[in-house]
Structures are given as structure tokens and as C-alpha cells.
Amino acid sequence: MSESVISVLEEKNGSFVPEKMLIGFSEAGIERELSRSGFEWEHNGEKGYRIVKSLPVYCEGLLKKYLDSPGKYKVYLMQSVDSTNNFMKTEFKAGAPEFSVALAEQQTAGRGRMNRKFISPLGGIYMSVLFTPERSKKIIKPAELVNITAAAAVSVAKTIEATTGLKAGIKWVNDIFLNGKKVCGILTEGSISPDQGGYDYIIVGIGVDLISGFDGTGLETIAGGIFEKNHLPKDICRVKNKLTAGILNNLVFYYEHFGEETEKILKEEYISRLFIMGQKVTVVRTDLTYEAEVIGLEDDFSLSILNENGNRETLHSGEVRLKI
């Protein structure tokens, strides 16, 4: 599709744009590109063109409009890929620069934590961001990897709130919830340099369910979307690209400004959205499941709990599930 035409029309949120504002495009060219886009559109001889209903797809022109520093990123736009994290690992080996971003309309083999399948239908936000600490002379130790995951969680929650007005919650350590249902999962992976002890690369994979559509999957009661499929914004293309850019803007800001003051702010942002504080939960570890109560969050983003025997315990990994 023509990103220039789509970008201009989507920004108007359903209002007409005169042809003279679509510089460099003939009437035939405009209509050809709009038809190819699959969007519902209208032409009025006096008023110009407008998009009546868009689709939840990426548009590079819109994405760049909302990025704080568009020249910083190398963006890979794909219709489909097995996993954006897998794709980015391959690109890192091929020399991809820091802040490379893989964006896909769908994933055929998306992965979550503990190697679980992450359902990734058309219409969602599936992205992986590459950080190369060793190349950029930035030391991030293995114990600090969770800070990156926490920054991603806050970035997603803040962006959803700023873009939609909805209140997002975080379930330790990396799931985003809206209205009691999970709408986003985050998978952070890295490769440690044997020479430096830090990371050669860190890849943050983020999957956001933009549209609720889990009927028949068995996940209907626990997974949702930012929007219901029958109540999408008519400018859903613009919204999707604005959300994607906002997540990138926030995440890269936290990464570039990691330090005592920034980490303090990050923790405050994280705790303010951590809805399991004080709640009864089920702790799931590799070979153990037990009941506990969440009592706090440590500076390293590990979770403090009181286990079923009344003893205080610190979780550095694992999973917690709210007791219903």
C-alpha cells in the first residue's frame, strides 16, 4: 500500500482530505493504492478522499510519524514469520545494528516464557527489539536482564494508557492485563559474551493482542484484547502504529537511560500497576506448586512472598497465578 496516502488519510480519522493535499499522486494512483490496501474508502469530487474503515496493519509512514527518532531504527516489516525473536537472532548474526526492530502481522510459531506457545493471529502487534550491549560498550549483567523485561512491561502499559485511556495492570513479571484478561506477553532473551561477562545481544519480544478473538481456543476466560473485534476504532491502522511506536519510544528511553534515578522511576511505574500486591497467589516453579501471598517487590524486581508455611521467600523466577 502507499504509506504516504494512507498516512495522510489515517491522520484525519475519517475526515475528507482534498486531492491537492495528496501531493505527487494522480487520482488513478490514489485509488489504485487505496483499493490495494483493503481499506473502506470514499471519494467525493469536491471534498477529496477519506478512509471510512481501516485495517489493523502496519504502515511504515505512520510508524515513523510517531517514533521520537525514526532514523535510529532499522525496521523489518513482515506479513508473517515463525517468531520475531527467531528472526531477530538471525539478523543479529548477519550484523543487524542496535535498535533493529522486527514487526510482523502474524506469527506462526510465537513463543512465550517456559517455551509455551503464544497464539499470534492476524491483527496483533508482534515485535522484537534488538539491543547490542557489547557493541555499544554498555555492560548489562545477567542479574539485570529482568530490568529490561520490567521496562518493556511498563512501556507497554504506559503506551496503552496514553493511547486508549484504558488502565493497564502488570502481573509479575511480564504480563499486561486489561479488565481482568491478559492482553500482552513479553519474552526477553539474550546471549552472554564469554569474554566480557555481559550480553552480546538482548532481544525483547512483545506480543500485544490488539483485538479480542480467542473464541474456540480455550483461552476465552483468560486472554483478551485491547479492543473487541466488533468495536474497533475506524482508524485502527493509525492506532496500531501509534501503539507500536509508543512502546518503542518508551522502551528505548529506559534502556538508554538506565541508572539509579531512572531505575527508581521505573520501579515506581511498575509497582503502581502491579495488581497482585497483597493478593493470594499460586506459585508455579519448575518442579513445585504452592500457595502464597504477595507482600512486596525488591529493587531487583524479584517478588517477596509469604509462603503457605508463613515464611518469607523471594522469587527471582517462576510464575504466579491469581487465586480465583
Image: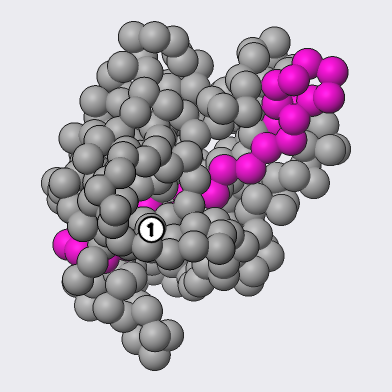
Q: Please state the horizontal and vertical placement of residue 39, each as a whole percent of the image.
A: 39, 68
Q: Compared with residue 118, is residue 128 higher up or lower down, i.e. above or below?
A: above
Looking at the image, the residue that sits furthest to the bottom is 216
Q: Please state the horizontal and vertical placement of residue 269, each as a whole percent of the image.
A: 25, 29
Q: Amino acid at mark 1?
A: Val
Q: Taking 63 as reference, is 229 left or right?
A: left
Secondary structure mostly taken by the magenta-highlighted segment of the chain: strand
Tell me if residue 141 can be seen: yes
The residue singled out by tag 1 in the image is 283
Q: Residue at x 56, y 27 (%)?
A: 143
From the viewer's side, name the closer residue of 248 and 203.
Answer: 203
Q: Compared with residue 206, is residue 120 higher up or lower down, i.e. above or below?
A: below
From the viewer's side, name the closer residue of 72 and 265.
Answer: 265
Q: Taking 168 as reference, is 202 left or right?
A: right
Q: Residue at x 69, y 14 (%)?
A: 136
Q: Residue at x 35, y 47 (%)?
A: 172
| SS at badge 1 | strand
How many numbered discs? 1
Neighbor class of circle 1 (other Cα within 10 Å; few <14, some 14-19, many 20+) is some
Q: Please state the horizontal and vertical placement of residue 133, each as a whole percent of the image.
A: 67, 20
Q: Which residues are magenta?
A: 175-201
Colour convention of the picture = one colour
Does residue 187 belong to the magenta stretch?
A: yes
Tell me if residue 111 can be seen: no
Q: Residue at x 68, y 65 (%)?
A: 82
Q: Compared with residue 117, is residue 202 higher up or lower down, i.e. above or below?
A: above
Does residue 92 belong to the magenta stretch?
A: no
Tell me the quarter of the image containing the C terminus: bottom left
From the viewer's side, name the closer residue of 239 and 136.
Answer: 136
